Image: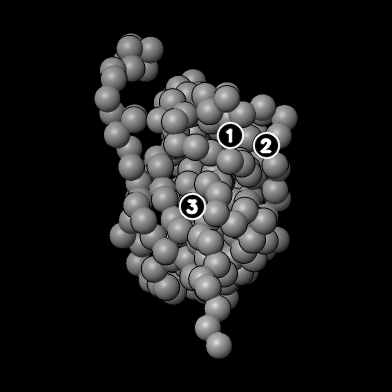
Amino acid sequence: MTHPLSPSVRITAVRHGETAWNVDTRIQGQLDIALNDRGQWQAQRVGMALSESGIDHIYTSDLQRAHSTAKAIAEHAGIDPKTIALHAGLRERAFGSFEGQTYAEIENKWPEESKRWRQRDPHWAPPGGETPLQTRDRVAHTLSAIAAKHSGQHIVLVAHGGVLDMLYRLATQQAVDAPRTWDLGNCTINRLLWTPESLTLVGWADANHLETETRDEFTA
C-alpha cells in the first residue's frame, strides 16, 4: 500500500543582523548582544524583501539580536510581533569559555584548543560549550519539532551563523567537520524545503536586498 507524500514546509532561514561583536570578530555564542546600527538596517531590508512572501509563522532564537531581526520581518509582513515564537533551540552554538573573546585572544590564550576548534573536531567543545555534533543534533531536533507543526505552510526561522551552518550541512548531508564553502552572511535569505523524510536546499545566501541601495548612514 502506498501513502501520499506529506505536504512540504517552506522554510526561510535568516541569520540575525550585524552586531558590534561581529565586527570585532568576538565570539558571541549564547551571550545576549544587541544589533548595531548596520544590523538594524539589515533587519529592515530583509523584512522588506520578505514582506510579500506569504509568511505564515515566525520562529526566532530568544537572543535579542535574532529577536530584533524577527520583529522587523514580522512588521513588514503585517504579522503581529507578539505572535513570534521564541525558541531556545535556535540559539547559537554554546562556546563556553570562548564567549566574549576575539579570535586572536582565543589563539593566544588557548592555542591547542583553538586548533581543535579550527579543525572542526566533531567531539570537542570549549569548556562549558557544545560540540559540533551536539549543535547539529539540537538544530535537527528543533527544526523537526517546529516544521512538523506547519504542514503546507511557509515559516521563517531567525537564528545564528552556527545554526544556519548546521541547516546547510543537514540539507546537503555534509559532515560537521567538512570544510565550509558556503556563506553565512547577516540577514541574507536562505531557502529550504522540509518534509518528514528529508530537508532540501532550495536557495542560499541571497543578498540582493542588501546591495540594491546605498547606505549613506554607514559610509560617513
> For the residue labelled by badge 3, is the local secondary structure a helix, a strand or a loop?
strand
Three-letter amino acid code of the residue under disc 3: Arg
**3 or 2: tag closer to the N-terminus:** 3
> For the residue labelled by badge 2, is the local secondary structure a helix, a strand or a loop?
loop
Three-letter amino acid code of the residue under disc 2: Ile
> For the residue labelled by badge 1, is the local secondary structure a helix, a strand or a loop?
helix
Q: Quadrant of the C terminus?
A: top left
Query: Is 100 placed left or right of 54 in the picture?
Result: right
Query: Is 117 placed left or right of 188 in the picture?
Result: right
Q: Which residue is mark 3?
A: 10
Q: Which residue is mark 2?
A: 84
**1 or 2: tag closer to the N-terminus:** 1
Identify which residue is drawn at 48% across, 43% down. Answer: 14
What is the distance, in whole Å, between disc 1 and disc 3 at their CAs? Answer: 17 Å
Q: Nearer the viewer, mark 3 or mark 2?
A: 3
Inspect this view and state whether residue 59 appears: yes
Identify which residue is drawn at 35% across, 67% down. Answer: 179
Residue farthest to the bottom?
Answer: 1
Three-letter amino acid code of the residue under disc 1: Ala
Identify which residue is drawn at 58% across, 41% down. Answer: 56
Question: From the viewer's perspective, is residue 209 above or below residue 27?
Answer: above
What number is the disc on residue 70?
A: 1
Callouts 3 and 2 close, C-beta under 8 Å: no
